[in-house]
Image (cartoon, rainbow, N blue to C red):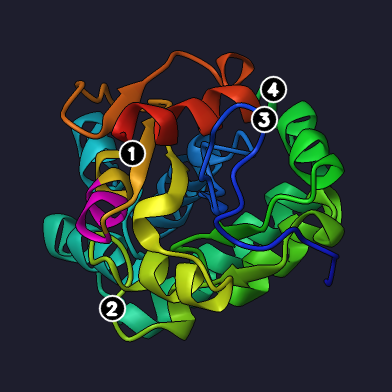
Amino acid sequence: MTSTVPALGTRTGEGSALQAVLLDMDGTLVDTEGFWWDVEREVFASLGHTLDETWRHVVVGGPMTRSAGFLIEATGADITLAELMVLLNEGFEDRIGRTLPLMPGAARLLAELSEYEIPTALVSASHRRIIDRVLSVLGPHHFRLSIAGDEVTRTKPFPDPYLLAAAGLGADPARCAVVEDTATGVAAAEAAGCRVVAVPSVAPIGPAAGRTVVSSLEEVDLAFLRGLMTEMR
C-alpha cells in the first residue's frame, strides 16, 4: 500500500494545509454497526440471554473487550471474555462474508482522496482479522496504513490509535481530518488533537469546538476537509 504523495504541509490552491485523512471503519465507511449488534444478540441468545435494546448505545464504537465485558456482566452469561470475543469475531466475519454494504458517499470519498494522493489511514477498534476482510472490499490501495484495535495497548476512546496513524503518515495530528460515527471515536480523535467530522450512526453526536457534524458522507469531499484546516487559521 504505497503511493506518491506531495510534501506534507504543502498548501494547495485553496490555501489548505491538510496533511492526512484518518477514517474510522464500522459505521463510517461500511454499514456494519448493526451487524455487530445482530451478532451480539445471536450469540447471547444461544447462551440463553436476551440483550436489552438500550445496551446497544453502550457497546457501540468501543473496543471489543469493553463491549464484550459489559455484556457478560449485564447478562451474567457463563462465558469467558476470550471465548466470547472468538464467537463475536466469527459471527461478524460470517456476516461480512455474505454482504458488506458501504455507507453512502464512502466509495466516492475514497476515490477522490486516492486521486489527489492524500495520505489516508484506516483507524478502527475492530481486530486485524476483521479489518483485513473489510479492506479487501474497500480496496487496500486507498490506504497508506491501517490501525487495528488489537494492535494498540489502548484503543478508542484513548487517542493512541489516531496519534499512531498520524505518526505513521508523518503528519501533525492538528493537520489531520478524522471522520468518525460514534462518540467513542470522536473522543479519541479529539484527544489526539485532530479536526473531527462526525457522521452519527447509532447515537446522536452534538457539535463542539473543533468538530463538525454532518448527516452523511455525501456531504464530505476533499474541498470540505481542506476547509476544516482553513477555518483553523
Residue tagged 2: 154
Image quadrant containing the C terminus: top left
Residue tagged 3: 13
Spatial CA distance of label 3 from label 4 is 24 Å
Spatial CA distance of label 4 from label 2 is 30 Å
Give the extent of the magenta segment: 187-192
Return the residue nearer the eye: 43 or 106. Answer: 106
Q: Residue at x 47, y 76 (%)?
A: 167
- Foreground: disc 1 or disc 4: 4
Mark linked to residue 105: 4
Q: Is residue 213 left or right of residue 183?
A: right
Mark 3, Cα crowd under 10 Å, few <14 / some 14-19 / many 20+, is: few
Residue tagged 1: 182
Return the residue nearer the eye: 188 or 112. Answer: 112
Q: Residue at x 27, y 61 (%)?
A: 192
Spatial CA distance of label 1 from label 2 is 17 Å
Q: Residue at x 32, y 73 (%)?
A: 160
**Which structural element holds mark 4?**
loop
Mark linked to residue 21: none
